């Protein structure tokens, strides 16, 4: 949920996560925009495969890793831009 | 393009309150200063600004105003700033390797000031890893910088001043706080009162926060903690809360209650960031009241390594107001050590700053004590709780390794992989060591994770940058 009291956000944009469209505003991070849209689950942990999402929001914990253009990036440190294609940061299954 | 080493008199890592003041002070003494930070703007976490795309339609709050003044001061100074730069390696010859939007960059300097602040401690429980559960410090960023609520209904848990600050901000932003779960008892707060009175303005702010929370009808559960969180229907979270004793251990015989919410915010205090000082093999000491392991310091700012200086909460939790003064202290001391001030001038300048620092840290340290972790608290971490989130290592696996003879955290790391993942043990290090210390008897004996680069995950592509093969200097072949 956004707090819009006394605030003007950036331009509204559309980006995708795992192929689904999400609305956000320029200035928001990928992690926060998804969290706000009710999609906190960003990846599964490599060992137990348990669902994970943003946690520390300051680039320390590495839990919010997502994939953008085949690169692993921290969703909390990556601003959304129009047309950005984001995918889950789940590692390839070791059994593949 | 082959990158070269850039030279500076002083490199400052971290553009929070301490880093900004250290950098500006050193630059004002005529030193060439470079300030590096991972974020797009200065302020650190405490004075983190909104994204530049957002505009306020009301007056700035007190904290926002301090942040704006700090940023303005930095802008007007001669400090060279490198934002969005991630430092991934630091070596003892005072060389710093970073990656930024324009590729890799390297610096060598005469004095390195570490002002990297803190990370948040969360004492694990089953379910703390679920999406929708975030740190207390994370919530402050979400609220004040991204201007978002964690959920329609949020439970706020942990300890320290951030609890009421976050809960009050949620209420103010139109959200519902189901409960504030404070591990500290009312008595613990009362014990801190003599120091808290040293900053009546901040104390008053705290009282106003509590009043706001109570007016909203939110219960404040003192001396209580989260026992576990389970996923509930419709993406909600079912939180079990139970009373704790004076060591913040769950009282299993006491009645628990279950609260269903959209999001949980939890934090158990702050831990000084020592990844760089550990990597440089500076001497450290364990000071529970200051948040944990800190680099030993001389005259408050000089570490045991030549040319390596400390500023702000990275060398002990003292709060933002103290960090501002501590940064100035670091800047002056570096100025003296690098020959920009003679001893009389240094003394005259440093004395009043030191006095202000001591005054400011009174309040910060009282808060620090409220956030410090009692050594026995980790007894309550249940066997199935994931302690190391990166490698999914549970308390049970850690205990098994201890039973087999692991007596030092680096042994535990080698045996279980705890602390070996991409966060480099920043999230679990303090907890794992506390669990081991229950057996070894002290945190000193349990030790700390050896610091090593890369300090943050980086790809080879980021490190090398883009280049033409013809640009690679090829040394003359040795004579046959």
Image: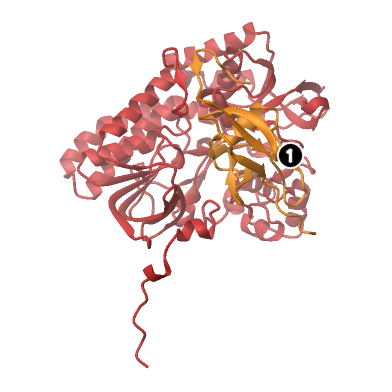
Chain colours: A orange, B red
Q: Name the quadrant containing residue B428.
A: top right
- Where is residue B295 drawn, in percent x and y? 45, 47
Looking at the image, residue B155 lies above or below residue B101: above
Looking at the image, residue B340 lies above or below residue B61: below
| Front-most of residues B189 and B462 | B462
Q: At numbered mark 1, what does the secondary structure look like: helix, strand or loop?
A: loop
- Where is residue B156 drawn, in percent x and y? 66, 23
Asked whether, in this view, residue B319 is left or right of residue B172, the answer is left
**Chain bearing mark 1:** B
Asked whether, in this view, residue B20 is left or right of residue B466, the answer is left
- Where is residue A2 drawn, in percent x and y? 60, 20
Q: Which residue is mark 1?
A: B381
Question: Which residue is farthest top?
Answer: B215
The residue drawn where x is 62% and y is 58% is B410
Q: Quadrant of the C terminus of chain B?
A: bottom left
Q: Quadrant of the N terminus of chain B?
A: bottom left
Report crowding for label 1: few under 14, some 14 to 19, many 20 or more residues within 10 A (C-alpha).
many
Question: Which residue is farthest front?
Answer: A83
| Front-most of residues B212 and B235 | B235
């Amino acid at each position: 949920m956004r707090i819009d009291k006394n605030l003007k956000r950036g331009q509204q944009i559309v980006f995708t996560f795992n192929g689904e469209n999400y609305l956000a505003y320029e200035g928001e991070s990928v992690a926060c925009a998804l969290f706000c849209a009710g999609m906190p689950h960003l990846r599964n942990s490599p060992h137990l495969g348990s669902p994970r999402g943003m946690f520390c929001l300051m680039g320390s914990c590495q839990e919010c890793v997502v994939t953008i253009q085949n690169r692993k990036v921290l969703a909390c440190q990556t601003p959304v831009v129009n047309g950005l294609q984001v995918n889950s940061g789940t590692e390839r299954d070791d059994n593949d | 393009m082959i990158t070269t080493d850039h030279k500076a008199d002083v490199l400052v890592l971290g553009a929070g309150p301490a880093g900004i003041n250290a950098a500006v002070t050193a630059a004002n003494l005529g030193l060439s200063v470079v300030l590096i930070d991972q974020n797009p703007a200065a302020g650190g976490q405490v004075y983190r600004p909104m994204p530049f795309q957002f505009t306020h339609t009301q007056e700035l709050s007190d904290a926002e105003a301090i942040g704006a003044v700090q940023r303005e001061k930095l802008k007007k100074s001669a400090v060279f700033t490198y934002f969005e730069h991630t430092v991934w390696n630091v070596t003892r010859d005072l060389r710093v390797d970073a990656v930024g939007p324009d590729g890799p960059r390297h610096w060598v300097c005469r004095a390195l000031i570490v002002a990297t602040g803190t990370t948040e401690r969360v004492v694990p429980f089953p379910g703390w890893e679920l999406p929708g559960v975030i740190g207390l410090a994370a919530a402050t960023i979400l609220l004040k910088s991204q201007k978002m609520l964690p959920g329609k209904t949020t439970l706020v848990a942990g300890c320290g001043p951030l609890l009421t600050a976050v809960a009050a901000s949620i209420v103010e932003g139109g959200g519902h706080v189901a409960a504030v779960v404070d591990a500290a008892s009312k008595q613990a707060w009362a014990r801190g009162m003599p120091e808290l009175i040293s900053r009546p303005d901040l104390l008053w702010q705290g009282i106003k926060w509590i009043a706001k929370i109570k007016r909203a009808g939110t219960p404040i559960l003192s001396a209580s903690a989260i026992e576990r969180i389970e996923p509930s229907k419709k993406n909600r979270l079912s939180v079990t809360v139970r009373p704790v004793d004076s060591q913040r251990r769950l009282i299993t015989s006491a009645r628990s209650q279950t609260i269903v919410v959209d999001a949980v915010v939890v934090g158990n205090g702050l831990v000084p960031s020592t990844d760089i000082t550990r990597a440089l093999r500076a001497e450290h000491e364990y000071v529970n009241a200051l948040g944990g392991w800190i680099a030993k310091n001389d005259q408050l700012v000089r570490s045991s390594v030549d040319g390596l200086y400390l500023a702000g909460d990275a060398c002990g939790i003292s709060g933002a107001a103290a960090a501002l003064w501590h940064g100035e202290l670091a800047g002056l001391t570096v100025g003296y050590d690098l020959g920009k001030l003679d001893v009389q001038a240094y003394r005259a300048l440093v004395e009043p700053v030191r006095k202000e620092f001591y005054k400011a840290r009174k309040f910060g340290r009282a808060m620090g004590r409220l956030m410090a972790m009692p050594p026995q608290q980790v007894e309550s971490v249940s066997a199935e709780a994931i302690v190391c989130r990166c490698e999914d290592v549970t308390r049970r696996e850690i205990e098994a390794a201890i039973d087999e003879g692991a007596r030092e955290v680096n042994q535990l790391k080698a045996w279980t992989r705890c602390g070996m993942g991409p966060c480099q043990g920043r999230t679990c290090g303090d907890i794992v060591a506390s669990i081991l210390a229950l057996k070894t008897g002290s945190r000193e004996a349990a030790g700390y994770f050896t610091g090593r680069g890369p300090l943050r995950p980086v790809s080879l592509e980021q490190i090398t940058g883009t280049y033409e093969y013809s640009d690679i200097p090829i040394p003359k072949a040795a004579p046959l």
